[in-house]
């Protein structure tokens, strides 16, 4: 890497991140069915109809995985808890094996000196709740609050930090407007309701965790910079709409108690009754804000229905996801978030990393592209810090190659290669490079 730990302020937190369904192996330990299982079992939704039944078998191999995190010198591990592993029916009787698993996992992190940074929900909604309308049903805020009480009642006392929901945009828009993730809907009314209920559930879970005496509570929002396709006012307006429903909606809800006008123009008739009354819950005070950042999109206007735009391919080098590499966007988001929304509140980069066409050859994986990608983004993080942004940590996505949702297992994001036949782990050269950088 072209930085070391000492290039960042004292106490800056270096971490790596994963999520439950992407690595654990959902078929183990009495977990209930989720909407991702049924989505993946439907032809055309997921590459080769792959699912998270086995994934990386982290459920059995977590000790080995935590050893690798600790050996690299990371301070923190950002993991998530599976709702369906804890409450197989989404509500009601907890699964003792599931609670025991997260208890063991927590203690194993602490035993290695790793700070546990939990996200409660990273997309595997219990099927029984999806059957009741999932995120479209206003009751989900209470169901989620109850889940929070059960799982954090067990492990909350040992969490370094906690955030309720990973990437609300994906839970809402990607899954209910674009239909690309479970439950695969393409419906504006479903989207408006899901996005609002995600916000309300975030607030309710935060209240529950405060009630349990937990501290260091935050949120995790994914962001994509929107670049207008050209300099016309129409192209600029199109990019602003993208920015409004992708990036500003959640920040504005949590930190300003409102939704952007550019989104309300289309959402207002579809939002649930008395939605404005929910902001007192949505605005529950937080201790930090997390940004997940990977890329930008080039936005062109069109004459189709709202949002009247589409994405066009950009000219920059791309990752294996076909995402343009645009580190400047990370800097711009860090500065803008602090300036317009969060002021002195600590910011964390809760995800950043790349999928690469990694090849295991003679027992090694050389991934200079990933080292380069990380170098460029860490550089922007340092720039933001020197310009006064209260950035306090950086989590690399991801520890392991894993289940990349609708794209199955072929998009490798890991610092550690996983052979999905043998489940053997092989640290890549990016892992070795980060290990040297963090030693200092
Ligand atoms: O793998 C995902 C993760 O689940 C959420 N953030 C983006 C990653 C890469 O697409």
Image (cartoon, rainbow, N blue to C red):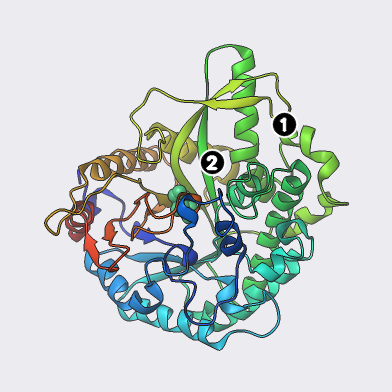
Q: Which label is found at residue 337?
A: 2
Residue at image coords 27%, 59%: 416
Q: Which mark is residue 262?
A: 1
Q: Quadrant of residue 337?
A: top right
Lateral position of residue 281 relative to residue 106, left or right? right
How packed mark 1 is, by other alpha carbons closer than 10 Å (few <14, some 14-19, many 20 or more), is some
Q: Nearer the viewer, residue 435 or 19?
A: 19
Q: Quadrant of residue 68?
A: bottom left
Who is closer to the viewer here, 118 or 353? 353
Where residue 363 sits: x, y (%)?
14, 59
Q: Residue furthest top?
A: 232
**On screen, 116 above or below 183?**
below
Residue 42 visible (yes or no): yes
| Percent coordinates x, y for residue 173 in the rendering | 64, 45
In the displayed structure image, the side of residue 402 where residue 164 appears, left or right: right
On the image, the x and y values in percent for residue 346 come to 48, 53
**Helix, strand or loop for disc 1:** helix
Residue 347 x, y percent position in the rendering:
48, 51
Residue 207 in view in this figure: no
Q: Residues within 10 Å of mark 2 (few under 14, many from 20)?
A: many
């Amino acid at each position: 890497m072209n930085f070391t730990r000492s290039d960042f302020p004292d106490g800056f937190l270096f971490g790596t991140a994963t999520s439950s369904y992407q690595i654990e192996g959902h078929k183990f330990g009495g977990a209930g069915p989720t909407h991702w299982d049924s989505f993946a079992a439907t032809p055309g939704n997921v590459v080769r109809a792959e699912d998270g039944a086995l994934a990386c078998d982290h459920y059995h191999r977590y000790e080995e995985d935590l050893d690798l995190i600790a050996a690299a010198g990371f301070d923190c591990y950002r993991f998530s808890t599976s709702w369906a592993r804890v409450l197989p029916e989404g509500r009601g009787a907890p699964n003792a094996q599931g609670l025991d698993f997260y208890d063991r996992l927590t203690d194993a992190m602490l035993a290695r000196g790793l700070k546990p940074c939990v996200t409660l929900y990273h997309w595997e909604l219990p099927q029984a709740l999806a059957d009741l309308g999932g995120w479209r049903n206003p009751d989900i805020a209470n169901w989620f609050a109850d889940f929070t009480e059960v799982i954090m009642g067990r492990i909350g006392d040992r969490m370094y930090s906690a955030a309720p929901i990973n990437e609300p945009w994906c839970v809402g828009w990607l899954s209910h407007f674009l239909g690309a993730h479970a439950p695969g809907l393409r419906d504006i009314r479903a989207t408006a309701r899901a996005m609002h209920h995600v916000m309300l559930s975030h607030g309710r879970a935060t209240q529950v965790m405060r009630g349990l005496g937990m501290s260091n509570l935050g949120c995790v929002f994914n962001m994509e910079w929107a670049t207008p396709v050209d300099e016309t006012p129409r192209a600029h307006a199109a990019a602003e709409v993208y920015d409004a429903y992708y990036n500003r909606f959640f920040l504005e809800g949590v930190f300003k108690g409102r939704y952007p006008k550019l989104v309300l123009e289309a959402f207002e008739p579809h939002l649930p009754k008395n939605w404005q009354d929910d902001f007192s819950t949505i605005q529950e005070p937080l201790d930090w804000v997390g940004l997940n950042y990977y890329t930008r999109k080039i936005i062109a206007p069109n004459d189709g229905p709202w949002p009247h735009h589409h994405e066009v391919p950009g000219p920059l080098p791309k990752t294996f996801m076909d995402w343009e590499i645009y580190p400047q966007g990370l800097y711009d988001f860090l500065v803008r978030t602090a300036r317009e929304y969060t002021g002195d509140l600590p910011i964390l980069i809760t995800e950043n990393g790349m999928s690469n066409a990694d090849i295991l050859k003679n027992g090694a994986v050389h991934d200079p592209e990933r080292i380069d990608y990380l170098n460029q983004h860490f550089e922007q993080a340092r720039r933001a810090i020197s310009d006064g942004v209260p950035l306090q940590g950086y989590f690399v996505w991801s520890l392991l190659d894993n289940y990349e949702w609708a794209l199955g297992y072929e998009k490798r994001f890991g610092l550690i290669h996983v052979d999905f036949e043998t489940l053997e782990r092989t640290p890549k050269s990016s892992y070795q490079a980060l290990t040297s950088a963090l030693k200092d």
